[in-house]
Amino acid sequence: MPRWRVLVVFLLPAVLLYSVFIVYPLLSAFHYSFFEWRGIRQAGFAGLGNYRDLFTVYPYDRQLWRAFAHNALFFAGTMLIQNTVGLLFALLLFRYGRGRRFLQAAFTTPYLVDPLVVGYLWSLLLNPTFGPVNALLEAAGLDSWALPWLGDTRTALPVIIVVNAWQWVGFPMLLFSAALAGIPAEYHEAARVDGASAWQAFRRVTLPLLTPAIGVVSVLTFIGNFNAFGLVYAMAGSTGSPAGSTDVLGLLFYRVAFVEGGVEAIGRSSALAVLMFVFVFGVSLLAGSYFRRRERTLV
Amino acid sequence: MRYRRLPALAAAGPGTWKARRRTRPPGLRRWIAGAAGALALTLAACAPGGGAAGPGDADDGGKVTLSLWSWRVEDVKAYEKILAAFERSHPRIDVEFKAFQATEYNNILATGLSGSDGPDVAQLRAYGGLQPLVEAGQLVPLDGKVEALSGFDPKLLEGAKGHKDGKIYGVPFAYQTLQVLYNKKLFADHGIRPPATWDEMIAAAGKLKAAGITPFAVAAGPDATWTLPIVHEIFGNARYGGAKFRDAVLSGGKKFTDPDFTASIKLIKDLEPYFPKNVVAVKIPDVQALFATGKAAMYPTGSFDLAPVLQANPSLEVGAFPVPPPPGSPVTTPVTPGWADGSFGVNAKSRHQAEALELVEWMATPEFGRLYATELKQLSAVPGVTPPDPLLAEMAANYAAHGAPYMLLVDFRYGQPNGDAIFRDEVQKMLAGQTDPAAVAESLQKGVEQWFTAGN
């Protein structure tokens, strides 16, 4: 058998599964988004009509940008809180080895729980009427801190970002731990011999060598945050409560596709799905090539 | 980078591949063929219209099995009991009741109806929720086929009609009414009677609040925004002018920006002091618990909540009253808003249409209505059926006397964005202090104008 045929035979099962479960749905969403829909019946070619609707029909014209901005904030907040704290944990665990296994396991336990469940548990904890968080704050005399955390437009999104970070902080920690372990000890010794302070050694030696890990963490965080749904849905409902202050693209998609249930639903929601995919895919590609270029300057 | 890797792979190639080919287990090709076959089978099972012959196919001895789909997972036992009565009087027909998760039902049904193994008879959503199925041609019009429908309340039949063709696609099974439930014991303890005027109601609310009791169990949290238009209907229907205002909006004489409608929205803001603290963070289970445990005295909600409330606390003594008209209302009687809950219709692709029609015809009879009302403790849509529960009977009587449509649900769910959805978001915003009643009304008008044209 010629080599290419062997290749085909080996690749075929994976390609088949991949095409059926990933490529086909993606292509069909793409296809659907260019048609007018009446329920589940296609009513004719719509061109870019569904896409135009998303940007022009009230209230989607506003909700789309608002949701996009919230996703961007979600990403920025997660980079700032989750990934910084993850790096800090990784450094501490790397330096003080005691209990490392246990702590690594402990920090990654929330992984095991679905975001929907995490969101539900935290919204119980933060419940203003019966929740223990505010009861504790009040018991400690911090009455003015006992806010309706998820009911205030100023605190709801930050609270969700923090809960999300609480769940996933173990992920950057593990990746950074692995990357730290891969940095040859001689580099640090050399830095110390040259008289570098701890901060200088971190800033000039460790951090640049973590670039590949930072790249991977950033891109995966970006993908995760721009596709956020479960946690936000559990904590803020399908409308991004309160008053849309936590609305993200995933929720907007869910509402257009399933909640409002108009006869146009399939076309518009497919258009939104395609936009989200193109954006996330495009930015991930760009970010990937950026970080690869940075890596190359290191060597 | 990618370019650099490929030649490396090629360089390592020939020998390795040859080696692999020699050691390949002989069964591999068969295994791959098997895997491909299994995959094909899985796909066939997923595809609509594939295999899976339903029991309806087997006509042994002329007996036909109809499948009936519903979103009421909670009611399977009750429906089986109800349908047993049908099977007794129609010995030739068996009915298989199948319930799906309510949140998934619309998609499951739309897919089922498009294939060949869908239901013969299906429970259908009302008004806007019905249209995707009608427009896709998936249902049998029942005009002239189910005669009893001519005796049904036209208000309720609207929920089962195609919006464009005006044909009836289902036999309505139930309707819901909106009013205030109250805790009789709390009222008696504080010397309060069901209010006859708006001012009496506000005075009662003030008295309860002073006694440390939440007057109105209202939630506006993440899971509760859909209840806000209901709260608005209960307190504001008379204020905006009820059915007359609705007709004016539909014919183009008035808009949602009308001062009466704006005033009806403002009522919610005015009542906020009598809602639980931080109402925007309060969820539905919270208010249900408040009401069931006697920490809240009044619960503005639908007839559908009576059974769950009593389930949470069977010893609770519950009464109900329609809200007296607020000052300045164009309508001077207490109004009970309501709407059709849904209907039962026939799949256009059913292989047993005659029998399916027999079933929906039976669902329009008082026999079905009485069984439905008794077993499920809901308001039957069949004319002349009174619910055995005295409180439900009272709600039904109020609706019969001064009923009005829940306009945003009944008329403004036919397009995207749906009026109800915009309104609930905006009212929540108002309760969060981010907008005012006039702006809420403007957003609503602007939203529905995206697809709604008056006089249509």
Image: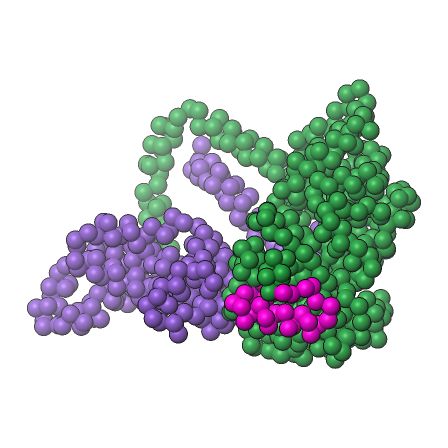
Quadrant of the rendering where the N terminus of chain B is positioned = bottom left
Instruction: In the picture, one chain is green; tell me its letter.
Output: B
Task: Give the residue at x 51% y 28%.
Answer: B34
Task: Give the residue at x 33% y 32%.
Answer: B19
Q: Is residue A93 visible?
A: yes
Instruction: In the picture, one chain is purple; tell me its letter.
Output: A
Q: Is residue A97 above or below residue A13?
A: below
B151 vs A176, nearest the viewer: B151
Task: Give the residue at x 69% y 63%.
Answer: B194
Please provide percent x and percent y for residue A121: 43, 55
Quadrant of the rendering where the C terminus of chain B is positioned = bottom right
Name which quarter of the figure residue B399 lies in: bottom right
Is B94 magenta? The answer is no
Q: Is residue B354 above or below residue A89?
A: above
A34 vs A104, nearest the viewer: A104
Please provide percent x and percent y for residue A52: 66, 68
Q: Is residue B430 above or below residue B348?
A: below
A57 relative position to B62: left or right: left
Is B209 magenta? The answer is yes
B45 vs B276, nearest the viewer: B276
Which region of the structure is painted magenta?
B191-218
B277 relative position to A84: left or right: right
B58 relative position to B427: left or right: right
Task: Give the residue at x 69% y 54%.
Answer: B303
Name which quarter of the figure residue B37 lies in: top right
